[in-house]
Image (tube, coloured by chain):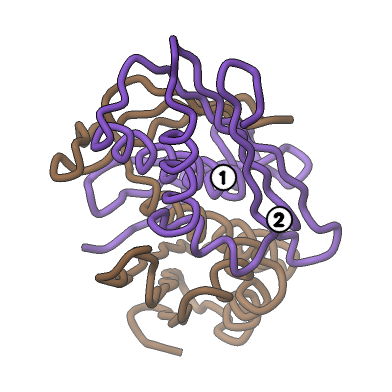
Chain colours: A brown, B purple
Amino acid sequence: MEFKLSRIGKMTFHSRTPSGHDVIVDTNRDFGGNESAATPMELVIVALMGCTAMDVASILEKMKVEGYEMEISAKSEKSSEHPKQYTWIELTFSFEGDSLPEEKIRKAVDLSQEKYCSVSAMLKKSTDLSYRILVGNEEI
Amino acid sequence: MEFKLSRIGKMTFHSRTPSGHDVIVDTNRDFGGNESAATPMELVIVALMGCTAMDVASILEKMKVEGYEMEISAKSEKSSEHPKQYTWIELTFSFEGDSLPEEKIRKAVDLSQEKYCSVSAMLKKSTDLSYRILVGNEEI
């Protein structure tokens, strides 16, 4: 169960994950890249959003909450000095649907962010990770 | 410059990064996924490998080291308890080529791992991150 990564361009790399999927990473032209794929630091935030989204969907299913749409957005800032890590990341969870149970939605997001989401748990140790929840454009 | 993520399947999500690239995440059937793409936790390690690979390629270019092939592999273990974060990650940097300058290669990898790689810097705060360097199958 190993990850492999090899070079397919100046700053373009192909990786194969243990689950057998291919992921390409690339970077900005300023850094010699070809801008053909997401950057490594972008993948960190995609991983974060994907991880918490799966938790929330799974918890809401257990709570029998249905008929909602969920979108997650993220804003962030990086340090200007090396290593250029994220100094903060803010996630916004947006739910749309009729008569959504706000309390259950808050509980599901809190459980993911405070207990289950592995990527959040890892990133919290190095960055200021915060989140907001919107239900039909109203912050709850 | 926002990241967006939306649901395209039970546990399948589509994200769009600020650089305009699409990344799909999915998960194992055991967790209700469709196994159509890398998992969020896999993307964390892909990000790590991609980040350090770009650094090393860039530093070796500045050092005028040419004519090498580099592959990176990674092994890891996750906690069995929630949140199931990585307890350790080991990277192996493998170089192939004729008469490669081992000292420069070591310096380039050390600089990435100790100074430049943003993903490594973030992950080190939450996991035991180690690395090995092989030049033509010999550990240096």
For disc 1, the chain is B
**Which residue is at the far top?**
B98
x, y (%) of residue B7? 47, 51
Pick the front one: B106 or A105: B106
User: Which residue does the numbered mark 1 point to in the structure image?
Assistant: B45
Residue extending farthest left: A30
Q: Chain of mark 2?
A: B
Q: Nearer the viewer, residue B54 or A25?
A: B54
Name which residue lies at 78% across and 42% down. B30
How much space separates mark 1 and mark 2, taking CA atoms?
10 Å
- Tell me the kind of residue under disc 1: Ile
A124 w.r.t. B11: above or below: below
The image quadrant of residue B26 is top right
Marks 1 and 2: CB-CB under 8 Å? yes
B123 lies above or below A15 = below
User: Is B76 displayed left or right of A129 in the figure?
Assistant: right
The image's mark for residue A57 is: none
Q: Farthest residue toward the right?
A: B80
Residue B50 vs residue B91: left or right? left
Position of residue A81 relative to residue B76, above or below, is below
At a point 46% along the width and 73% down the height, the residue shown is A98
Q: Mark 1 vs mark 2: which is more N-terminal?
A: 1
Mark 2 highlights which residue?
B86
Q: Nearer the viewer, residue B94 or B65?
A: B65
Q: Position of residue A40 (x, y in %)?
A: 39, 47
